Amino acid sequence: MNRHLAPGSGEILSASEYEADRIGFLTQGTTRHGDFWEFAPHIYVAAGPELTREVFRRTGAQFSPSRGAFPLPRGVRRALTPGTLLPESLNAARRCFRHSGTTEHTAMVAAESAALARDWPCGETEEVMPRLKRTFSRIGAGFCFGADAGALTHAEAALARTRDNIPASTLYLPRWVPTVTRLRMRRRINALAGRIGAVMERRLAQGRAMGPDLLSAMVQASSDHGTPPGAPIAYLLSTILVASQEMPTRAGAWLLLNLARHPQWAEHIAAEADALPLDGYRVDAGHVARLRTADAFVRETLRLYPPNWLTSRIVVQPTDLGGHRLVPGDRILVSPYLLHRDERHHDRADTFAPERWLEVSSPGTTGAYLPFGAGPRLCPGASLASLELVLVLAMTARAHRLSCPEPRPYRLDTNGALTPAGLRLVFHPRG
Ligand code: HEM
């Protein structure tokens, strides 16, 4: 059995005890030992805005991200290392992810959000994450592949199912152990990348007019440069496709839970959303900019429940952090969750108070708010995520009042993303 050390106490815990309250340990450890402390031999926690930002900022230099459970074939991993993908294609992708690029997809995102709001089953207790996931998955596919999105859904859903069922034991095993789950996942990724490659070739063969989607932008950039788009683009897009629904699904679930728990805010959001056209395809960036209460509610939800609550980095060069000497192989944990709930940086840190985002000096200006990370690995999908979360929230609040069927209608899962696993809510249609 894996054994773990409780912070500061020297007490050894079983794996299940440790799993049960990882957040509690991190919080207690930081309260007792300050912003830098040893969690277990060679594993350190860096807290507070300065150290957290520093770790994010130095990623790619002294720190490397630890690889998740996404085993790309080795040749492709090499092809995706910085400097090997055509810079023109990457720049084109960056432009698509900017605020100005994502607003081009406003109508598609609004139409998907309106469809989701219409389809919540009325008056019944519903497990919310599967429907949220389908919606974010369709939005992600539309953003990446435009009119060709439908050709990818089957392969993407198969990969998503495999990722959903990764046993915790697989995450703790060394990366080279070829577990059944890992082999299956690799097959699924290859299948998805293969489908993307086929779409790419079809478009090139047909010389099809390019739309605002990510694939078009990347293919166009490499063709302009005289380079045929290759497997790296297909694999990069498959990782983006997966990322486009994993975190938003968790964030969306926390949002709906908060909507059920804070009916007064729900009424404000519904009133604001009444100004949206009923037909999602007629919603534009101007409408979204006026959803200020919904936007504040989303930001506050991401503050208290950042899906990416804990991130780790491996030290790759001898270096100092906060006056401490680190050697290659050491691991540093940083936690947006700890940062967001730190009373030194957030007034009434544990209270759900969206109004703080409507004030002039909002928490976003203090450097102590990092739901999308920071530095070179800052989430490229932040703008798209904000757009879709605001619209899903507004459309759902306009159509339904939500309630919780029981006091704690979910199981807190901290294994990977912060997740209200199995969240069940009741949707009461507004008259
Ligand atoms: C609420 C929604 C989201 C949250 C909270 C979130 C959070 C994050 C965070 C914190 C990271 C950095 C991880 C690290 O530093 O180790 C990240 C990376 C990433 N995110 Fe997001 N994300 C969200 C939505 C999205 C969406 C919608 C997309 C794509 C359309 C996306 C694509 C990615 C990709 C591709 C990376 C890897 C970037 C890299 O390795 O350089 N994310 N995300």
Image: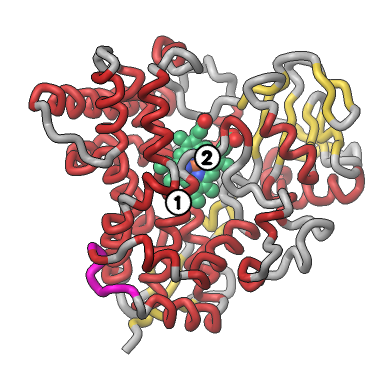
Q: Is residue 217 left or right of residue 178?
A: left
Q: Amino acid at mark 2?
A: Cys
Going 13% across and 26% down the picture, which residue do you hit?
202
The secondary structure type at the circle numbered 1 is helix
Q: Is residue 192 above or below residue 149?
A: above
Q: Is residue 417 visible?
A: yes
Q: Amino acid at mark 1?
A: Ala
| Residue range highlighted in magenta | 276-281
Q: Position of residue 180 (x, y in %)?
A: 42, 24
Residue 398 magenta-highlighted:
no
What is the crowding at mark 2: few (fewer than 14 residues within 10 Å), some, or many (at least 20)? some
What is the crowding at mark 1: few (fewer than 14 residues within 10 Å), some, or many (at least 20)? many
The secondary structure type at the circle numbered 2 is loop
**Seen from this angle, which residue lies furthest left?**
206
Is residue 16 or residue 41 the one in the foreground?
Answer: 41
Beta carbon of the mark 2 residue lies under 8 A of ligand 1: yes
Q: Is residue 175 above or below residue 402?
A: above
* Mark sitting earlier along the chain (2/1): 2
Q: Position of residue 345 (x, y in %)?
A: 79, 57
Q: Position of residue 205 (x, y in %)?
A: 10, 22
Residue linked to disc 2: 379
Beta carbon of the mark 1 residue lies under 8 A of ligand 1: yes
Residue linked to disc 1: 385
Residue 279 magenta-highlighted:
yes
Going 84% across and 57% down the picture, which residue do you hit?
344
The Cα–Cα distance between marks 2 and 1, rounded to whole angstroms, is 10 Å
The disc at residue 75 is none
Going 72% across and 35% down the picture, which residue do you hit?
333
| Contact between labelled residues 1 and 2, with CB atoms less than 8 Å apart | yes
Q: How is the image coloured?
A: secondary structure
